[in-house]
Image: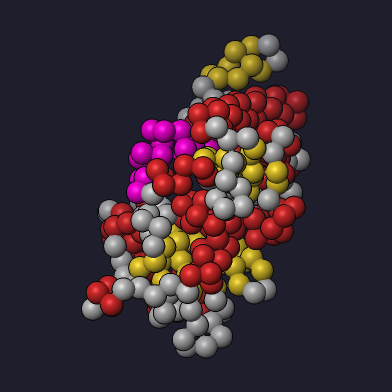
Amino acid sequence: MIGIDVGGANLKLVNEKGAHIHYCPLWEHAPITSLLEQYVTAPDDPAAVVMSGELADSFSSKMQGISFIVDAVKAAFPRAAFYGMDGRFHSRAVPGLAAANWLASADYLRNEYPDAVLLDIGSTTADIIPLACFETLTGLTDLLRLQRGYLLYTGMLRGNVATLLQSVNLNGVKTPVSSEFFAASADVHLVLDHIGADQYSCDSPDKKEKTKTASLRRLARVVCADLEEIGEEGAMQIAEQFWVVQRNLICDQVRLTAADSGARRIIVAGIGAPLFARELGGTDLNKTLGPVADALPAYSVRELALSSQPLPSRKEKQ
């Protein structure tokens, strides 16, 4: 059994050998089938699948994206079953498959951590999930999660620095920032030693090197400068101020969700788990689950499938 999470930027898989993550931006090219085929061991291999990539702007609608992803996965794994927002598995493309990856994580973790809020902080987004409220979570679209504060569009790698900063204090001078995509959150976290260069897995904004010096140069561009104009100290000021805003945004919302849901602890998964577990005094699931915590939805949907041995209804097969 293989667990698969098809995101807009990353294809994540979990099998008996562990977690496997491939950068696979659906808005540029989508070699989903060819990437999956290397994990096929037999024609009838079962697969359990979740997705969020249907929102990629290469698709004119979510349903078009769902259909594309289902067809691409089934070309490699014909027996694939897809977890939906109703908490059930389906054999074909239906609207309820849209962005159900976070719900699979909640479904898997809710029995072991019934009194927790889960923060899954990945490359692009932060999912904030009150596990005690699972029955009220089914059916929530990304729109509704945005409105409730359960989904924040800021992450460890792919966010535009200018989405959280309107200005920075640069050597004591309030300095507006450019809205161009000059620097990404990955640049911030690399220069602050929150991630290593090997974790900078997405394209850089200028598609150049992923070194600290290159990241500092990109950060200088945020205020329309060369690195030589503001120096490394100035670029680091931009990084530090972005981090303060991002940290406060995420941590404040996690604490608010915990208070509203009566949660007594916080658990954290994703690439940002070690960092945010420290900030929140929470449990880093990397320490309990191991590397699969960075591919939590893929791991969770696999475990759900193994425990329930899902068989899509006969009606769906027709």
Residue in view at x 47 percent, y 88 percent: 43
The spot of residue 303 in percent (x, y) is 56, 66
Is residue 173 toward the left or the right of residue 308 in the image? right
Residue in view at x 55 percent, y 32 percent: 262
Residue 237 is inside the magenta segment: no
Residue in view at x 64 percent, y 43 percent: 267
Placement of the N terminus among the 4 image quadrants? bottom right
Is residue 234 toward the left or the right of residue 66 in the image? right
Question: Which is nearer the eye, 203 or 251?
Answer: 251
The image quadrant of residue 13 is bottom right
Q: Is residue 52 above or below residue 140?
A: below
Question: Which is nearer the eye, 249 or 94?
Answer: 94
Residue 144 is inside the magenta segment: yes
Q: Is residue 167 above or below residue 12?
A: above
Q: Is residue 113 above or below residue 299?
A: above
Query: Is residue 33 in view?
Result: no
The image quadrant of residue 73 is bottom left
Query: Is residue 282 in view?
Result: yes
Residue in view at x 48 percent, y 70 percent: 308
Magenta stretch: give its range. Answer: 139-154
The spot of residue 124 in percent (x, y) is 53, 45
The spot of residue 191 in percent (x, y) is 73, 38
